[in-house]
Amino acid sequence: MSQQASELFENFQELTPSEFFRKNKQMLGFSGKIRSLTIVFHELITNSFDAAEEAGILPEINIDLKRVSKEHYILRHADNGPGIPEPFIMKVYCTMFAGSKFRNIQSRGQQGLGCSGCVLLSQMTTGKPARVISGYMEDSELKGVKLKFKMDVKKNVGLLMDREEVKLDHTGVCIELQFKDVSYSMAEQGAFEYIRRTMIANPHAKITFRDPSGHKYIFNRAADVVPVLPKEVLPHPKGVTADDIHFMAKHTDKRSYKSMLTSSLSRMSSKRVKEIGEMTGIDMKKRPKDMKWEEAEAIVKCFDKMKFMAPPSNGLIPIGSEQIEKGIRQILKPEFVETITRKPVTYKGGVAFIIEAGIAYGGEAGRLVNDQRKSEIMRFANRVPLTFDQGSCAITEALKSIDWKRYGIKDFENSPITLFVNMISTQIPYLSTGKQSIAPEPEILHEVRQATMTLARKLQKHIKRKKADKEKAMRSKIFEEIVPVIIEESAALGEVEVPDYTKVLSKVTKRAIAELLGEVPEEEEEEEEDEALIMEELDEYGYAVDEEQSNLKKEKSSQRFAVSEDDLIYEERMREQEEAKEAAKQAKKAKKAKEEGE
């Protein structure tokens, strides 16, 4: 029996991360021909952005995609970042789970799989090596090196095939990879659409892209400010587990539970540690190395019973409403755009996040399907477009739950609307290693709904105003077309000359439109305002009601009701002339009657 057991374990092996993902490349997002190429674009672009921003450089990327044959492409990706020093080049591109993104910090990437995953896919589909040119500064000197290498899947390291020093005039990295069994598409989930959406969330970047047909697209930057770098933040007591505390204890250099907790967790003070000691009965002066699992559990249960301030949000750097609007206007050119950045909140009690949203209507907003614009949802996490797995994402679920008819949008699916939602956090709760959908945490769903409904109310006002203006213009056009015809026909019937009706028509048109729309004509508004002013200032006898301003108001009253001497003389003369005319008329009648009698 023991011999059979030993035989079972004769083939027992250990897999390196590279070997594991070679057999499970779908876990990196490489599933499907279109999706695989889009994920390659995603990984290379996000790494270039992060590197440039950390160096305080406005990102500029040049991408050239050439088609060798059907489903066989050569991708050349170059950036203007700080470059990669030679000793780290193959570590970046050939070692899984290696990188600088394992801190508790807001970052586009979080797993150290991106660039190495692209090299792995290239090698698996073509067997071709990767080629990298890197320009970097070392001791104030610009250095350039060109490497050709493959990935040693068994050892999870790179195999150098060729090295050459080159002269460069700027820093940055250029990588060339070949891929088979992938496909370039202009569809919603294709590489082109990924770049388009990336530019909305990163208006400070510039991307030049030449597609397989040779067409060159230039996406210019809409902003000239490098985003502020996020800061690393400590975990919040409400967001840690017993395993987290136990791991901290085994790997800390602190000498007591107290110093470990205060230095490793945010919102943790000496007073709080003392309370934890009293509640759990644990000696907070003990060495962390001696911590037992039961103690870690007791500490976490104590955290659940205590109240802490919300985690600090100064480590979260949102895009900003103004920058989002610039990005949307640059790419979509809408007739209406509105954006919002919500205040920081937490999910699971201790992980801070911020929701940003934007809504665009008209112009090039929405998806173009058979010459018709349909609604479009753009999902982002830390500025990165999420182009796949839309149905299972919290953002989609929240947006679909909104009753758009309440906001004057009767058919949301067939409306020219683009919804933009970005989640900012140090810990995006992705549903899979593909990092394409966000877990539907209740707090996240609530924030997305609140942000979007605020924007929807503003869009509703715009649509109502647009509809009223359209009706006004239509009624005005009808009125202006009909009235001249009536005037001309009336003149013809009366056999008189057609009068100049332009000024009269303008006044009548304004009055008619105002009445049709239930508004008050401008002339009547002015008269009503004047009358209201008089009624407010004067009593029924024309005297000022307000004693403090009586002199002023009596003056206004006298000006309104006084009659000048010249006016009285004029009226007297007119009355005399009327009397003389009447007397002459009566005399004429009397004379005529006398003649007829004779």
Image (tube, rainbow, N blue to C red):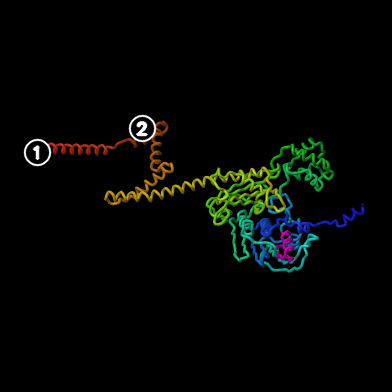
Q: Secondary structure at mark 1?
A: helix
Residue 318: x and y in percent read 64, 49
Q: Amino acid at mark 2?
A: Gly
> Residue under circle 1?
595
Q: Is residue 1 left or right of residue 405?
A: right
* C-alpha span from label 1 to label 2: 58 Å
Screen quadrant of the C terminus? top left
Instruction: Say if residue 308 shows up in the picture.
Output: yes
Q: Quadrant of residue 167?
A: bottom right
> Residue under circle 2?
542
Residue 522: x and y in percent read 40, 43
Q: Is residue 180 left or right of residue 297?
A: left
Q: Between 10 and 315, which is closer to the camera in this rendering?
A: 10
Region rendered in magenta: 115-137
* 110 magenta-colored: no
Q: What crowding class fits label 1: few (fewer than 14 Cα within 10 Å), some (14-19), or many (20 or more)?
A: few
Q: Between 548 and 298, which is closer to the camera in this rendering?
A: 298
Q: Is residue 69 left or right of residue 511?
A: right
Residue 183: x and y in percent read 66, 61
Q: What residue is rendered at 50% in x and 45% in y?
A: 464
